[in-house]
Amino acid sequence: MVIDEELIWTEQIENICNKLLKYTSICYKLRDKLPGKILRNIYYAFVHPHLVYAIEIYTNICSTNLDRLISLNNKLLHILQDKPVKFYYSECLCLLLFHCKV
């Protein structure tokens, strides 16, 4: 956890984004080699904890900082589920969490 003097959390968000960027290439390489259930477990083991850790502090941050986290999460969801970019995030999340058919 990186705490700055003004409590704007920019450094913390940057730190999380850098961690998530490392997983994008790993997930891209694994998506064709592993079944969906294992990919889901990888997401929840390596990506999800970074997003939800101390999530309460992100309620007051600037939306531009939060948008970067959201877009990286969306990118990872699209990669893991091998969905096109036009596939909506809510549909990706539904597939990931509940194995819905859309």
Image: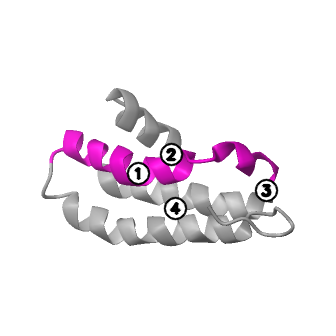
Instruction: Check whether the beta carbons of the residues at disc 3 and disc 4 lie within 8 A of each other.
Output: no
Whether residue 38 appears in magenta in the rendering, the answer is yes
Q: Which residue is mark 3?
A: 61
Mark positioned earlier in the residue sequence (1 or 4):
4
State the extent of the magenta-drawn residues as a range.
35-61
Q: Which residue is mark 1?
A: 77
Residue placed at 57% from the left, 70% from the top? 15
Residue placed at 50% from the left, 45% from the top? 88
What's the residue type where badge 1 is placed?
A: Leu
Q: Where residue 100 appears, x then y in whole percent?
A: 35, 27
Q: State the separation of the CA atoms marked 3 and 1.
A: 23 Å
User: On the image, which quarter does residue 64 sit in?
Assistant: bottom right
Graded by Cα atoms within 10 Å as few (under 14), some (14 to 19) or many (20 or more), the crowding at tag 2 reads: some
Q: State the separation of the CA atoms marked 3 and 4.
A: 17 Å
Instruction: Check whether the beta carbons of the residues at disc 1 and disc 2 lie within 8 A of each other.
Output: yes
Q: Which residue is mark 4?
A: 72
Q: Where residue 37 appears, x then y in whole percent?
A: 22, 39
Frontmost of labels 2 and 3 is 3
Q: Looking at the rendered structure, which numbered label has been put on residue 89? A: 2
Mark positioned earlier in the residue sequence (1 or 2):
1
Pick the residue in front: 47 or 35.
47
User: On the image, which quarter does residue 29 sit in?
Assistant: bottom left
Specify the farthest residue to the right: 6
What's the residue type where badge 3 is placed?
A: Ile
Frontmost of labels 4 and 2 is 4
Residue placed at 82% from the left, 50% from the top? 60
Instruction: Check whether the beta carbons of the residues at disc 1 and disc 4 lie within 8 A of each other.
Output: no
Question: Which quadrant would the N terminus be assigned to in this image?
Answer: bottom right
What's the residue type where badge 2 is placed?
A: Tyr
